[in-house]
Image: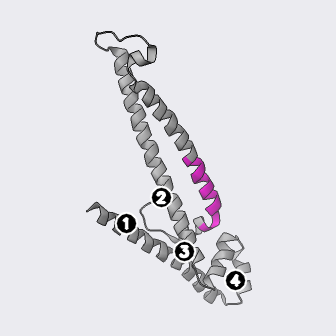
Amino acid sequence: MINQIMTEQEVKEILRNRETLLISIHQKMSAIEQDMAKTDDMIETMSMPANSISGMPRGSGKQKDLGDVYRNYKKILKRRNEEYRTMFLELVLKEEMIERVWEAYMRLEEPYYSIINRMYVQSMLYAAVERESGWSRQVFEKKRKKGIQLIVDRVNRQEEEHNRVISLQAI
């Protein structure tokens, strides 16, 4: 869902599971924040001069194996922290996409809003929604498809505009 064309299937999935998807994203963000804080603390501790940690003055000899281990471990922690930041950004972008889909859904006019709401948000059966509409199967299906397509088109236009603005800022 990141920097790609939104599909009908993704729209349906988001409409059906918006709350669950958002809860999952927020739980992951919280876990990442906790892990980042631990990693930041470990990096800060390892960045202290040895005499600050032990209270003893440092020797004048070269650092041997233990010093190399610490340096390597510090690099690993920094790399891990960068991964956490990347994962966090991906989650932010997923959340933003979910909210764009929801906004596009909320902007639908009737009868599209009612059809999409009943089928995907309220999870009513296709046949029940079709029957309630009073339209023929072909008319109902055209309106259902058009409602989904209106959401897809709006979200993709927003994504294109967002990407265009970012590319202009990079110039």
| Residue drawn 39% across the image and 71% down it | 161
Q: Do the numbered discs 2 and 1 sit on residues whose CB atoms are within 8 Å?
A: no
N-term-proximal mark, 2 vs 1: 2
155 up-or-down from 2: above or below: below
Residue tagged by mark 2? 93
Residue 143 in percent (x, y) is at 59, 85
Which residues are drawn in magenta?
A: 15-29
Query: Picture quarter containing residue 71?
Result: top left
Q: Based on the displayed image, in which of its 4 quarters is residue 118 positioned?
A: bottom right
The secondary structure type at the circle numbered 1 is helix
Amino acid of disc 2 = Leu
Give the number of the mark in front: 3 or 4. Answer: 3
Q: Which residue is mark 4?
A: 130
**Crowding at label 3, few (<14), some or many (≥20) Cα neighbours within 10 Å?**
some
Q: Earlier in the sequence, mark 2 or mark 3?
A: 2
On the picture, is 106 further left or further right than 51? right
- Residue 10: in sight, yes or no? no
**Image quadrant containing the C terminus:** bottom left
**For the residue carrying disc 4, how many other residues have a C-alpha within 10 Å: few (<14), some (14-19), or many (20+)?**
some
Q: Amino acid at mark 1?
A: Asn
Q: Earlier in the sequence, mark 1 or mark 3?
A: 3
Q: Which residue is mark 3?
A: 104
